[in-house]
Amino acid sequence: MTFNAAALLLLIAGLALIGWLAGRARSNLLAGRAGTKLHSRPQYHGWYVALWLFAPAALFLAVWASVSPALITNQVLTSEAAQSLPAYGFERGAVLSDARNVALGNQAKVRMPAAAPLVKPYADAAHKYAWIGIAAMLALALAGGLYAFTRIKPDFRARTRVEKIVMLVLLLASLVAILTTFGIVLSLLFESIRFFRLVSPAELLFGTEWAPTSGAPQPDTFGGIPLFWGTILIGAIIAMIVAIPIGMMTAVYLTQYAAPVVRKWVKPILEILAGVPTVVYGYFAALTVAPALREFAVMLGIPNASTESALAAGIVMGVMIIPFVSSMADDSINAVPQAMRDGSLALGATPNETIRQVLIPAALPGVMGGILLAVSRAIGETMIVVMAAGLSANMTANPFASVTTVTAQIVKLLTGDQEFDSAKTLAAFALGLVLFIVTLLLNIVALRIVKKYREAYE
Amino acid sequence: MTQDDLTITDPKMKAHGVNVFYGEKQAINDVSIDVGTDLVTAFIGPSGCGKSTFLRSLNRMNDTVASARVTGQIELDGEDIYAPSMDVVQLRARVGMVFQKPNPFPKSIYDNVGYGPRIHGLAPNKADLDVIVERALVRAGLWDEVKDRLQESGTALSGGQQQRLCIARAIAVDPEVILMDEPCSALDPIATAKIEELIHELRGKYAIVIVTHNMQQAARVSQRTAFFHLGTLVEYGKTTDIFTNPKQERTKDYITGRYG
Ligand SMILES: Nc1ncnc2c1ncn2[C@@H]1O[C@H](COP(=O)(O)OP(=O)(O)OP(=O)(O)O)[C@@H](O)[C@H]1O
Ligand SMILES: [Mg+2]
């Protein structure tokens, strides 16, 4: 007997169906017998019973499925056979998982002799907890179903109750995303704190030397400034120099000049561009743009020209962000009331003058908000910079030279082969935290601006 | 529609046989009207009868509506405004427009008024512009209220002040005709009275055409009144005649409030 969550879910769904039928039948019966009018139609009574039967049991199932493995392992560890286990670390985990696999029937024989005596305790524990879980779940389902069933009366407001339960379910669903994010941020925070025990925050934020060379004779240095500079150079400067003008011009063309047919085609195409996987842009940057730029730079005689250049990554990232900027600008320009445009045209201004002197200034707050959002996306972008910007932490304003960014370094730190709690690995979390805080602030400011602006034209 | 009771000897604008279509739908049907140079002309009629449509065809604002099409003849000082040689931008500088809802630009009061003169190059330098802005604001009766806060945003003014700002903005480019589409419909009675007073003062300096739903307002501010119904011009004449002695049954019904 093992604990199979999917089968159990099916079981309670089946029970819920029976509950639904029973609830409906009972309310029909009541209505028929008393000759009174039901407050809610019979299927609402059915739903009420079914939901009460299903929801608590399913919730329990979810919780149990996630905690029971830990409970099982705990019990196994208290068994006699476990006393001879290797003290800690990798080996211990491997032996345990070997025993577990055999006990659960996933593999026929133990691979490690040490696991053999653990198979039986494992199977026993699994068996025990499976039964506990199933019994508790069924008890909950029946209790819920019976509770709901006994409440059915002609004047019972099942319809209102069902509405409330549905609302609760939806609320829980929306909490999942929020709580998960919250959990991720917390883990980021904890790992970062561990890092800051080894390296001071001041060094990370203001140090100018980035050299996390674990094992090398000289000590590691975790000065983040070169990374921050690289990130700003690529994401906030070069990418924006490309994306802002082109995105704005696209938006102006689409909102003011394009014939409806053109707009009908170009807008969706731009939106599709926004969905191209960034790795595709990364290829383009690394294989096409970067070599071309290097040749160009060599031709001009620019020193330090590298095949991995800030310019290549920045330009391609800018191109990637164009649809984003243009769609934000499009929305902002469209939000400027038609009356404003008419007012300007009626004074004898040309469409071009109207756009430059009235529409864009009026749309500027919204556009600014959009640009900040674009920056926050650009600095969090990873694939393009990993593929095209390089990994050498240079502090240079030469766009043809190689620089590195926060995201590229996070990837590099985590893909290496080292212990999980080395300063090098932990540094990735600290960098992630810095990035998270910066993009969060950017997003808050941007959304505020956009919201204020919307209100102004309400 | 008779011409004999019209004593307009020197019309500023002449419309003849004008039709306006939105796509297939005809919104204005064979309208002919003369707009007097020194007069205030009022357009009245039930909602949807085409007053705004016709007004907007007088400065070609209908060009901004993709589906709109105008046929017939409209002249400004004897010049066909729909002729290919006509510069629409120039035309709109000569025939200004004030809208139903005040629509100041989100710029300072000064820049709102200075916007037109700047784009038309009427003010070579700052001092000239100062003079133009002040004169327009004085004419629009707003100067005393805003002279100490010219750099504040135009959108921060009250509704009535905003509408006078829009009138000042139109005046600043020195137009010959001012079209007003229900300029008081978003204003309270006091602000309305100020605008009406202003129209009195502007009369003679500009040819003024005003669309209004308010019969008393038409009677108070205009010398000529045109009554539109279902896209046609039913009756056009001296305001006093239209209101005291309408020739058409439909006009009488509308003025006495029987429909509309
Ligand atoms: N942009 C447009 N596209 C299509 N039809 C329009 C458009 N503007 C106006 N119309 C139609 O033309 C007719 C006349 O409209 P118009 O706005 O000129 O009426 P109006 O007399 O000004 O009405 P109101 O007194 O309500 O302002 C109406 O039937 C209207 O539906
Ligand atoms: Mg109208």
Image: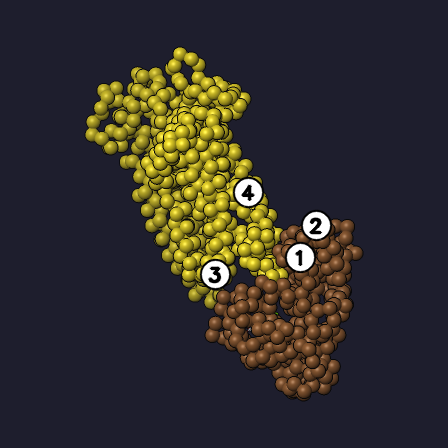
Does A423 sit left or right of B74 as displayed? left
In the image, what residue type sits under mark 4? Ala
Mark 4, Cα crowd under 10 Å, few <14 / some 14-19 / many 20+, is many
Which residue position holds label 4? A446
Within 10 Å of disc 2 (Cα), the crowding (few <14, some 14-19, many 20+) is few
The kind of residue tagged 2 is Lys
Total numbered labels: 4
Q: Is residue B57 above or below residue B140?
A: below
State the image quarter where residue A107 is shown.
top left
Q: Position of residue A266 (x, y in %)?
A: 41, 54
Q: Distance between the residues labelled 1 and 4?
A: 39 Å
Q: Looking at numbered disc 1 in the image, what kind of residue is underneath it?
A: Leu
Q: Can residue A346 be seen in this view?
A: no
Q: Cβ–Cβ below 8 Å for labels 2 and 3?
A: no
> Where's the C terminus of chain B, which quadrant?
bottom right
Q: Give the Cα distance between marks 4 and 3.
A: 47 Å
Instruction: Tell me if residue A183 comes above or below residue A48 in the rendering.
Output: above
Secondary structure found at label 2: helix
What is the display colour for chain B? brown
**Mark 1, residue position:** B122
Chain whose colour in the figure is yellow: A
- Where residue B126 is drawn, which disc sits there? 2
State the residue position of label 3. Answer: A40
- What separation in Å lies between label 1 and label 2 (alpha carbons)? 11 Å
Q: Residue at x 75, y 58 (%)?
A: B135
